[in-house]
Amino acid sequence: MKNILKLAYLLVIVLLVSSCDLSLKPVSDISTMGGVDSAGNTVKFKTRAEMQTQYNNMYNQLIGNNGVEGWTTDMLIYSDTHADNSYRGATDVELTQLEQQKQDGINKNINRDWNYYFSIIAAANSVICNVDSVPDATFTQAERKQWKSEGLIMRSMMYFDLVRLWGNVPLIIVEPPAITAANITKVYPLYYPPKDSVAKVYRQIIGDLNFALQSDGAPNIDPTNKFIFSKTVANALLAKIYAEKPVRDYAKTIQYCAEVEKDVTLVPNFGDLFDMNAANTDVKSRFTSESIFEINFSGGGNWMTWMCGIDVSDPNSKYDWAKWFTPSRDLIAAFDRAGDTVRKNETITTGNVTWSNEYPSIGYPFMWKYRSKFSSTIKLRLADILLLKAEALVEQGNIADATVLVNRIRSRAKLTSLSTVTADDVLNERRLELAFEGQRWFDLVRTGKVFTVLNTLNSRDPGRLPMDVVTLDKTLLPIPQPQIDKNPSMIQNPGY
Amino acid sequence: MKNTKRHQNRVFILYSCSHLFQRIISVLLFMFISLNLMAQKTEITGQIVDSKNEPVIGATILIKGTSIGTVSDYNGNYSVSASPNDVLLISYVGMSAQQINVGTSKNIRVILLDDTKALDEVVVIGYGTVKKKDLTTAVSIVSTKDIAERPIISAAAAIQGKAAGVTVVQPSGEPGAGMVVRVRGNTSITASNDPLYVVDGVPMSEINFLSPNDIESMQILKDASSAAIYGSRASNGVVLITTKLGNKGEAKISFNAHAGVTQVVKQIQSLNTSQYKALMDEIGAVTLPDGLTDQTDWFKETYRTGVTQDYQLSISNATDKMRYFVSGGYTDEKGVVPVAYYKRYNLRANLENQIRSWFKLTTNLAYSDYTTNGIISGLGSNKAGVILSVINTPTYSSIWDPANPTQYNENFYGAQVTNPVENMSRTANDKTNNNRFIGSVSGEITFSPDLKFKSTNSLDRVYYNRTTFLDPNTTAYGRSLYGSAYDNRSLSTIMVLDNVLTYDKKINKHGFSVMGGTSFTGSTWDQSYMTATHFANADIKTLNAGNRVDPGSGTSASDWSILSYLGRLTYNYDSKYLMTANFRADGSSKLNPNHRWGYFPSASVAWRISSEEFMKNISWIDDLKLRGGWGQTGNQSGIGDYSYLQLYNINRINWWVTGNTNAVPATSVANMQNSDLTWETTSQSNIGVDLTILKNRINLSIDAYYKYTTNLLMNVPLPATAPVSSLTRNEGEMSNKGIEFTLNTKNLTDKFIWETDFNISFNRNRLEKLTLQQIYYYGQTSMGENMVIMKPGLPVGVFFGYVSKGVDPETGNLLYQTKNGDSSSPALSDRTIIGDPNPKFTYGMTNNFSYFGFTLNVFFQGSYGNDIYNVSRMETEGMYDAKNQSVAVLDRWERPGMVTYMPRATIEKTNLLSSTRFVEDGSYLRLKTLTLSYNIAGKKLKSLGITRFQPYLTAQNLLTLTKYKGFDPEVSQFGGDPTQLGVDYGTYPQSKSYIVGLNVEF
């Protein structure tokens, strides 16, 4: 009996000692950021290093799926397939709808892009809303303001797209606080914002861009790295914003275009923008003198190239599945009408394929501005700004100056100079210069030409699927139904 | 427990072949002869047989009041010297003992009957056992007696259709696919609804490692008053499994083998080339050249006859101080789709030692190595889904590209499909291997006959390794990556330390039992994952042969622990009035320290009416008991390991990009911190009645329950405008109520024996309350539309969409019911509830017929009133793009005036809205297993030392009665996910199997 007790005692002790640890800390998840500052306020990030992880995350958004699938690939569906530059290419129902102007609220791509935009905005807000409260003395005010300015430009760029694609959208400029049992009734509604007006969104982004343009705001453009939201990006955005109908002010467009012109110059050859090097191992040049904002894929992650054609850096790459963005007959005709072989050859290539959905299988056209996984997504470049300026000048009646600008672009494309230009000439020049760069649909809507151009397209382009009539309502996309399902304050756009 | 007796039976049968036994007999005989001479008694001879007239070998024949006796030999014969006044006591384990007055008889033949006092069976409950008659709670005892004659590979399959209140669904036919086991419905939306498994005292979440042949008994704690002793892990019921131990007698060697063929249950025909071309010309999705001919039968290229093999060998024995069971086995299932397989090696050693009179040591060691290789399912043929591509791939195509015969033919003239052979090859080397070791050692100290202390220490360690390899040449995807390989390894270790003190005291008719203890569970887990691409060729499949290591490679780890205090008090008055109360307190590392502890009480009572005096005269009632109980249980599986903390994702920066050389990672918010998070709590009331009548010929149990779950864990989705996509919180309330019947009858008990086990269960689930968001949408059709709605007042998982009103003969478009009459363009507000995947009831019936050595086992099982959302049919009858379709579309609308059920072909989606068009009745009645076995008995076999030689033939899924148009109504692509129940989306089909097996014992 003595032995038994001894043994039992031993067991109990051993087991009790080993049975008390309920305070476990995460092993491989970060949970230690933030804390309390000297004034007793809770802050999300304590040090500059913690804040930097958020700053890095902001740019990381654009090279991840949010950037490649959303802001690069799907964007070209809205800008070019949804307009007159390209066909759907593949038979996916989402693309088919957009080609036919039959998009609806359950289009999966529209929903994913809505999500992408707002997650990029959330990443920007994490910097914008927290950078000033980091209790780290080594984190200079200048740097804080610079990071905040970059965040504001990024957020503005997203909202500029959102407001043009969907119209009224929720304006998210603060981070809602965490929901707890104590604050739930107060805080929870903040997570379900209603739509804000287009005017309010423009007011906000114009204000934000002006903040970024202050002398100690966003960085100046860096010729060696255009993957930074610089002052030049802010100027270019403001130029484009002031050309939009709700806030139209051509004088300001011209003024901001002029600011941009101080920082960047046209490359001599159009092809330099998209070409590969001789060995096809990388792009010929990245961050050219013309580039204003360019998403850098020097690491090789731009899989957009698989969606539109072959990857020339990969000798094994071949035309396997039907590719997206098949250049339309209407676009090819536009190049041919203008005798524009330089830009046509840089914009469209052909290949021999096994299918014949939109063209005969021999000499099947493909979009050619993304040639390899190393290709940049060039979001803003000078030619866009110069032609925008020309558009504004024409609207102001300054045809002479507009003609000079258009001819600068034409001469680079080895085309003859025009003696005078009309608004249609500028629009057409933009089409040829900027096809598949995310511009065409927005150009048509901005200039009001979208109805005449698209509602006659079926008669001009025999390869295009039968389209629904484009009405004013249809110049906006539907709010994705899942977003309406999630948020009772969200109402569908008219016409859907 | 009857099973034990059978095994003991077999153990004793072993005597027949033993020389040792014969020697013992000789010695005994010699003794008796000498005794006889001394006592002047007469020689009594005779035979001991059982109810089937089979000899009982090794029965003990003892003269009452003496130590004189003998045992029966291998023919059941005995001889003993006794005087006419003596009384013979004849006994055998598992049979009712008999007393016979010798009298003047010289030859006494004794028929020993099976000890049918099922009520004295011992039932395992949490941290203890109880006699079945003293049970106060709802416990299902799963019959394990026919496991050896059923070709089942997973232990969960042994439960299907065998226990009332427990629904088991095999969600797909893929070898090694886990079974979905639900005890009394779903109680959770985002947390697991799987029961807790406790194997030999070790709690765990899955039992894939376990060979059904090792199972001695299986009990399911269904109500909270029985399960609450497992506290925060018991909301979904507890399956208690005890593995075998040896019995006294000669060591038994048992060998069980079965092998058979499997075939896919049916074929869905696809269009031939000319039919397909006609369809494409109509849709205009792709332009096909003329002159294409049928080249490939994709069904034939994809499905084959599968082969299943299973071999299990065990050795067991026991002495007064020791019992052991050692087993090993090999299982190999090759699926009907060539790349799919499941392989398992299992080893087990169970040992029980009475080291001292006061100390018993029990050791259970199990090791299992199992591997699965699957296919791509649940995806369309445009995303390499195998099952749908069998139908979606046009038949004009060949497997291999004629121009590049080492590459798959991907020329479909622009159609977005890849052929099924290519799709299978994508996962030909996608192998998941688990090595699992479960070891438990428990020591039991007996301080006094009343007071015992038991300490159990167990280790459950799983090494998981998934490897994939995609060759750099044959597939387009492989070429784009230059070949790719992935390797994920993880090691999970769960330690459980239980200390339990029990005190049993019986004072006259008052029986008390007190149990108290602690339990600590600690888990550590870590993993490494790595991807490499750019392989020179397909020769070497390990990652060292890939030139580029993916930057997404890394390692991670996490851990959790639970500390518990538990107690139980039972009171029993003469097995007539019974009371049990349980209590458990759980503290979890996953919760905020401020409210880390949860408390789970339960209580139950029972009244055994049949023990009352006034019932004594009613002889046809053997047992009648009323039970009632209430308790609370928890579910913590939905809580992340650290989810009360604010967590951040670590996102790497591409360091090889200019300027990033020395970058450190970016972070992004991973969750919305919820420091209030706690476990789901289910309160359950149960009332039940057990009735046994007509000398144990009829057993009936009825249970009714009401379960109410609060603090339902939910991911409240937030709009895209929020910084995180969802908020995890305790958000809602849900109820399940139901009634279940179990009826076991012994219809015929003579030479021809017929026994029937029947059970049927009704469960009604309802979401009662949500706090924040009131409506949720889940699931997705292949058109991207959510088709499951969840809101208070409805059961979870109901289908949502439009009511289809057939095809408009003028336009060929599907008409939908709207507020303004039927229309082909309904408004979103016209959507309504269009189906419910929850069955109205499920049932199972086993009929066992035996005649001499023949046994016929007929097992039916079914489900009634559940709907299936056939998303597959959107892809095979949708006619919206260039995919090939099933022959059903030959009935499509083609010209105005045509009356048909199949709408026109069009690239538009109007006919493919979520609607009743794709919702089907999933009720079925299935002849799950039909087994014929023959126990060959004979002296020849006995002289070879073989005590049992039982070959059998089995057919599985032989016959299914259903209206369902897909492969099989037993389908759930997303397994047990309650938000996507009953969805068929390119799911690996079920198969029929024909199997021969053999059970041999030495």
Image (cartoon, coloured by chain):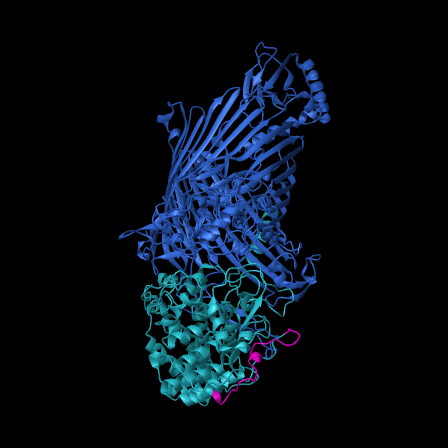
Chain colours: A cyan, B blue
**Residue stretch in magenta:** A260-281
Q: Residue furthest left?
A: B820
Q: Residue A454 magenta-drawn? A: no
- Magenta-colored segment: predominant secondary structure: loop
Residue B576 visible to the viewer: yes
- Percent across and percent down for residue B938 are 66, 21
- Say above or below: B672 vs B195: below
> Relative to the observer, which residue lies in front, B1001 or B58?
B1001
Left or right: residue B947 versus residue B646 is right
- Percent across and percent down for residue A222 are 54, 85
> Relative to the observer, which residue lies in front, A434 or B591?
A434
Residue B785, quarter of picture? bottom left
- Percent across and percent down for residue B634 are 43, 52
Q: Residue A270 magenta-drawn? A: yes
Residue A45 visible to the viewer: no
Left or right: residue B834 versus residue A21 is left
- Percent across and percent down for residue B180 are 49, 46
Residue A453, quarter of picture? bottom left
**Image quadrant occupied by the C terminus of chain B:** top right
- Say above or below: B327 vs B560: above
> Relative to the observer, which residue lies in front, A2 or B520?
B520
Residue B654, quarter of picture? bottom right
Name the residue located 64 percent from the left edge and 73 percent from the top edge: A280
